[in-house]
Image: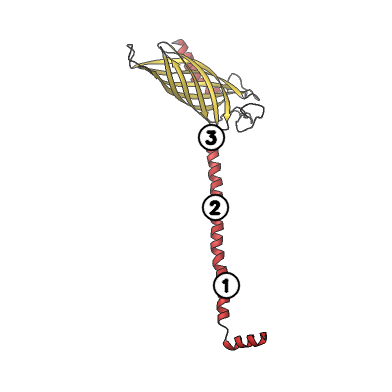
Amino acid sequence: MRTFKIILLLVIGFPFGTSRAAVDPLSGAQVHHPDTWNKFYTYVPTKEDYALEIGSMWERKNLYWLGALVGFHTGTCPFARMRDCQNYVDIIAGAGGRNGLNSRLMLASLRFQFVNFPSSYSPLARAFVGGIHIRDSEMDRSNRFNVVYGFGFGVTTSVHQRVDLKTEVRIGHGDQLWSQVFLSANVKIDKWIDYFAAQINEFSRDTTGVAKDAFKSTIELPGDLADRIEKTVQGQKKSPSEADQTGSESK
């Protein structure tokens, strides 16, 4: 219980002592890095971070794991005071299940993301606390809720301008020891929003240009047609004497 209180204090207290210093200008996968296999620098979100987790979980037996993460950037790490270490508060939720054993997790976590430029790999470490709800049809553990705490570590790398790939291991304890190993795809929502906004803006400009040209053609065509009609009418209005005179002059 004492360990649980210490971890809870760290998770709650650390973000308020952090400095929201600017992240290194290179900290974005939109910046090309031609010397690495993925061609991009590791991405460090400065606001929110979103991830989908797929992997395995062990809690008395091997389970499948599916989870989601929402992270909030809080600044530089309080113990380091350097830009290479960035702090995030993560909310993690998910479920693991197999053969009658289901475990649902809800965690609050403090993440330390280390960015070592120009390396394209970014290590991470986390401490977390939360709860686990267990349904076990084989043992007398159904509908049990336990407080859990633990730690995790992993590595992140950029595979696309708007997607990071993360491998992570978590070890926790509730009524017994449990662990997770999974692959996570971090979707950079802010970059996707910027991308679609740029596409919509470009499409609107193209559409406006086409509409403007069509409108201009619609305005100019009747004017040309009116001039031609006017010339035709004036030719038809010539008197017969004028026509005969014109004919005699031509002879």
Q: Which residue is mark 2?
A: 208
Which image quarter holds the N terminus?
top left
Identified by mark 1, the residue type is: Arg
Cα separation between marks 1 and 3: 57 Å
Mark 1 Cα-neighbour bin, 10 Å: few <14, some 14–19, many ≥20: few
Q: Is residue 209 above or below residue 11?
A: below
Q: Image height check: is 67 above or below 179?
A: below
Kindly identify the amino acid type of the residue bearing the numbered disc 2: Thr
**Lateral position of residue 29 relative to residue 5, left or right:** right
Instruction: Determine if residue 192 is in view.
Output: yes
Q: Residues within 10 Å of mark 2 (few under 14, many from 20)?
A: few
- Whether label 2 touches label 3, CB < 8 Å: no
In the drawing, does residue 101 fall left or right of residue 233? Answer: left
Residue that badge 3 annotates: 190
The residue that appears at 63% across and 86% down in the rendered structure is 247
Outermost residue to the front: 251
Between label 2 and label 3, give the one nearer the viewer.
Answer: 2
Mark 1 sits on what residue? 228
Image quarter in which the C terminus is found: bottom right
Question: Which image quarter: residue 101?
Answer: top left
Q: Quadrant of residue 115?
A: top right
Q: Secondary structure at mark 2?
A: helix
Residue at (56% x, 53% y) in the render: 209
Q: Nearer the viewer, mark 1 or mark 3?
A: 1
Residue 7 x, y percent position in the rendering: 48, 15
Q: Is residue 127 left or right of residue 243?
A: left
Query: What residue type is disc 3 on?
Result: Asp
Mark closest to the chain's N terminus, 1 or 3: 3
Neighbour tally class for label 3: few under 14, some 14-19, many 20 plus, Cα within 10 Å: some
